[in-house]
Image (cartoon, coloured by chain):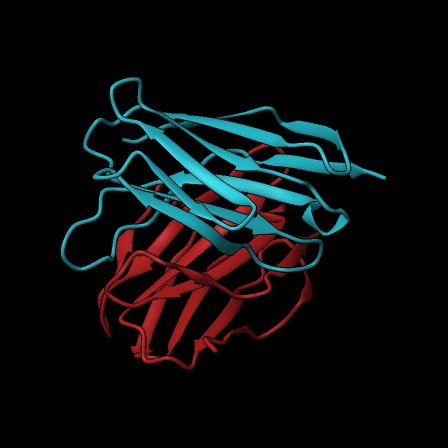
Amino acid sequence: GENVEQHPSTLSVQEGDSAVIKCTYSDSASNYFPWYKQELGKGPQLIIDIRSNVGEKKDQRIAVTLNKTAKHFSLHITETQPEDSAVYFCAASIESGGGADGLTFGKGTHLIIQP
Amino acid sequence: DVKVTQSSRYLVKRTGEKVFLECVQDMDHENMFWYRQDPGLGLRLIYFSYDVKMKEKGDIPEGYSVSREKKERFSLILESASTNQTSMYLCASSLLTYEQYFGPGTRLTVT
């Protein structure tokens, strides 16, 4: 089955700096890669996703890059703000017609924004 | 807005008890999922369902069963709770795409 590795487990950055979280996956058939943000006491929330037919996707201050050859993908957050403090999870899946398969998640990165 | 609700935020049960965790979604989604979340292990898939009365095992189904009698409701059952099932349980739902919407979670403690 799929295996997703995520690094680092904890990341502390100064407010205004950039943060990068990296993930690798094992199954070359995986073609859908979402990123979730989990705030304290809440369930994970999708913040951005990328499919294997593109190499990069951007949404305001967040971006995700995908390298299919190396089987890794990364989350980039620029101009970090206090509200970015949370646990971030990457995930991978094989997207087929029905969307029913579960996601395989990384172990999470605790992002801390220092004021 | 998609809403996924879980019956309890916190639950304390004794070893050997039968435990039901309920999840309801209000967006007519076909697919529903149960994950457990443990520190340092991330989220792990227990079971999922792509239709009423259909279920598929995830990565860690041992000790659990599920029930989906109605489209909007997906129940996770611990037949005989054990202390190693103390965890945060998260329910999610999705339409035909892969965007999964999560509930707030149920923190279960088995003593």
Depth check, front residue: A71 or B71 = A71
Look at 21% across and 26% down and name the residue there: A28
Instruction: Examine the rendering and report whether any part of residue B84 can be seen.
Output: no
From the top left corner, tell me how far across and down residue B26 is, in percent: 42, 82
Q: Does B7 sit above or below residue A37?
A: below
Depth check, front residue: A87 or A15 = A15
On-image quarter of the C terminus of chain A: top right
Side of B105 relative to B64 (left or right): right
Q: How many marks?
A: 0
Q: Does A38 sit above or below residue A52?
A: below
Q: Residue furthest left?
A: A97
Specify the quadrant of the image occupied by residue A20: top right
Look at 54% across and 39% down and name the residue there: B42
Q: Does A102 sit above or below residue B2?
A: above
Side of B65 relative to A113 (left or right): left
Depth check, front residue: A31 or B53 = A31
Chain in cyan colour = A
Side of B46 relative to A28 (left or right): right
Chain in red colour = B
Look at 35% across and 54% down and name the residue there: B47
From the top left corner, tell me how far across and down residue A61 is, in percent: 56, 46
